């Protein structure tokens, strides 16, 4: 029985899909004006684990991820520059080129981290019609007002506005913490922004009598509704999305459809910190997957580091921690490479594994079970493959380099090479059998001995 923590109810609950065996899953995707930093990627690794656990529980998943390629402003309070236009100025390319380049970079990061691809990718700029249609519905239903710079959602028109973040109990006064501009209430937010008269934007569309562009929140509510409907199972993102982005997505979707709840389960991944601060694109503490690679550290070692912390706990990044994760992963693979072919799994291991993944994705516990089982010889390769369906660490997928670094294997290969040089074929065959008993096949090629998994 799968249990997941739901931000909306603030409880761990048994997961129960709307349609038998099916899950509609929406994950807020990247804003493609720069590389993703490893903090952003922590959120996508958490979502990947969620997806793998759902898959392991035999759900048929429709996973939708958006690409934010317009409308995300540098300030959450609907002021500031569009991040895409900012990227364009920084690099002297068009906003469209920036979006394309960083979308590809993000997809390549996903592949490096062994993240499963969504079933549907959707770009905000390809869905302007769906967004303006949702804004029009909100206008028709009386949830909006217009100022000199855009169309805004009047949050006082919804009696449960802010339920996700429990904002009702936070008593925010107009003008107290936010720059109100012409907004009527502190939480009101832009649905459609008008382009400045003295500025030519690269990305703008004519709607509601003005050239302009969509607000960041409307893109997710319009696209998630288009692909997953007016009521679906799970929506997720990083913890910073709770108070503004997801709160506003709920307001738009529920006000326009009249159906509540829009989404049954909201899930949020905690932050990656560096020092005392969260890692952020705008700060100097921005580390990418490329930075890791230039230090000879592998993306999968970073994935392994992340899996050691529960997704709802903050994690402090340090180079030392990543280096020990790199070694930890190597040791783990080495132990896996030593599992004899005739090994058998203890059924209790499988039970413990299922319990841990279904307890709100308790992956640190899964790793502890795995290490103990390996050390006590209680696990076979078949079960390793099952674990790895969720962990995604390519544990069983040993490449040649990793096989060659196994000390025991290297000794056997050296001895076999010597036996062949001495034309002691009986000994060479005996060593071949020994290597086979460890699960590998040795071949003699022009380039020397090559080993592969049996
Ligand atoms: P963005 O590309 O800025 O829209 O962010 C992409 C995802 O990364 C969102 O789900 C954010 O919540 C998440 N995120 C941003 N900073 C961090 C961080 N330091 N640690 C974990 N997740 C983060
Ligand atoms: Zn979103």
Image: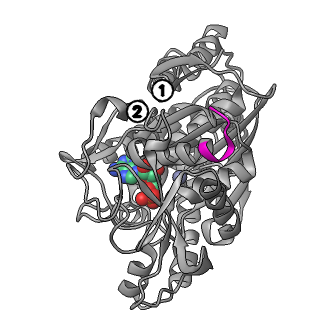
Tell me if the residue at label 2 has its CB under 8 Å from ligand 1: no
Q: Is residue 256 left or right of residue 304?
A: right
CA separation, marks 2 and 1?
7 Å
Q: Is residue 90 covered in magenta?
A: no
Element type at marker 2? loop
Q: Position of residue 409 (x, y in %)?
A: 55, 41
Q: Determine which quarter of the picture holds residue 388.
A: top right
Magenta residue check for 256: yes
Question: Could you tell me residue 47's position as x and y percent?
Answer: 55, 42
CB of mark 2 within 8 Å of CB of mark 1? yes
* Residue 346 in the image: above or below residue 379: above
Q: What's the magenta region? A: 255-260
- The dot on residue 367 is 1
Q: Is residue 105 above or below residue 403?
A: below
Residue at disc 1, secondary structure: helix
Q: Which residue in the protein does label 2 denote?
A: 308
**Rendered residue at 31%/58% (across/down):** 280
Is 155 left or right of 59, judged from the image as shown?
left
**Which quadrant of the figure contains the C terminus?**
top right
């Amino acid at each position: 029985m799968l249990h997941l923590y739901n931000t909306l109810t603030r409880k761990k609950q048994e997961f129960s899909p709307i349609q038998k065996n099916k899950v509609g899953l929406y994950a807020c995707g990247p804003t493609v004006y720069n590389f993703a930093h490893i903090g952003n990627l922590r959120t996508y690794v958490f979502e990947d684990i969620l997806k793998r656990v759902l898959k392991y529980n035999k759900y048929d998943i429709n996973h939708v991820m958006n690409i934010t390629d317009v409308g995300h402003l540098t300030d959450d309070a609907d002021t500031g520059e569009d991040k895409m236009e900012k990227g364009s100025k920084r690099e002297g390319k068009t906003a469209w080129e920036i979006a394309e380049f960083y979308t590809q970079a993000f997809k390549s990061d996903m592949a490096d981290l062994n993240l499963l691809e969504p079933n549907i990718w959707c770009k905000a700029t390809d869905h302007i019609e769906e967004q303006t249609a949702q804004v029009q519905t909100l206008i028709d239903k009386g949830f909006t007002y217009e100022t000199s710079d855009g169309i805004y959602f009047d949050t006082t028109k919804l009696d449960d506005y802010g339920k996700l973040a429990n904002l009702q109990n936070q008593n925010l006064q107009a003008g107290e913490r936010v720059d109100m501009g012409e907004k009527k209430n502190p939480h009101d937010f832009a649905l459609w922004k008008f382009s400045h008269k003295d500025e030519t934007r690269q990305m703008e569309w004519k709607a509601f009598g003005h050239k302009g562009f969509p607000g960041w929140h409307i893109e997710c509510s319009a696209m998630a509704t288009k692909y997953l409907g007016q009521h679906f199972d799970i929506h997720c993102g990083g913890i910073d999305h709770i108070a503004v982005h997801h709160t506003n997505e709920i307001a738009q979707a529920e006000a326009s459809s009249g159906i509540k709840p829009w989404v049954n389960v909201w899930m949020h991944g905690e932050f990656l910190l560096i020092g005392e601060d969260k890692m952020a694109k705008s700060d100097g503490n921005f580390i990418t997957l490329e930075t890791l690679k230039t230090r000879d550290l592998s993306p999968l070692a970073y994935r392994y580091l992340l899996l050691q912390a529960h997704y709802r706990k903050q994690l402090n990044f340090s180079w030392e921690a990543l280096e020990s994760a790199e070694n930890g992963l190597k040791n783990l693979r080495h132990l896996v490479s030593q599992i004899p072919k005739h090994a058998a799994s203890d059924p209790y291991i499988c039970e413990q594994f299922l319990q841990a993944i279904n307890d709100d994705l308790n992956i640190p516990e899964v790793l502890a079970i795995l290490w103990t089982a390996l050390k006590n010889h209680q696990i076979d390769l078949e079960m390793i493959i099952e674990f790895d369906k969720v962990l995604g660490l390519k544990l069983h997928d040993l490449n040649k380099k990793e096989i060659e670094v196994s000390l025991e294997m290297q000794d056997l290969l050296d001895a076999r090479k010597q036996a062949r040089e001495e034309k002691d074929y009986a000994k060479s065959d005996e060593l071949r059998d020994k290597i086979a008993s460890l699960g590998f096949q040795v071949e003699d090629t022009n380039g020397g001995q090559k080993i592969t998994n049996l």
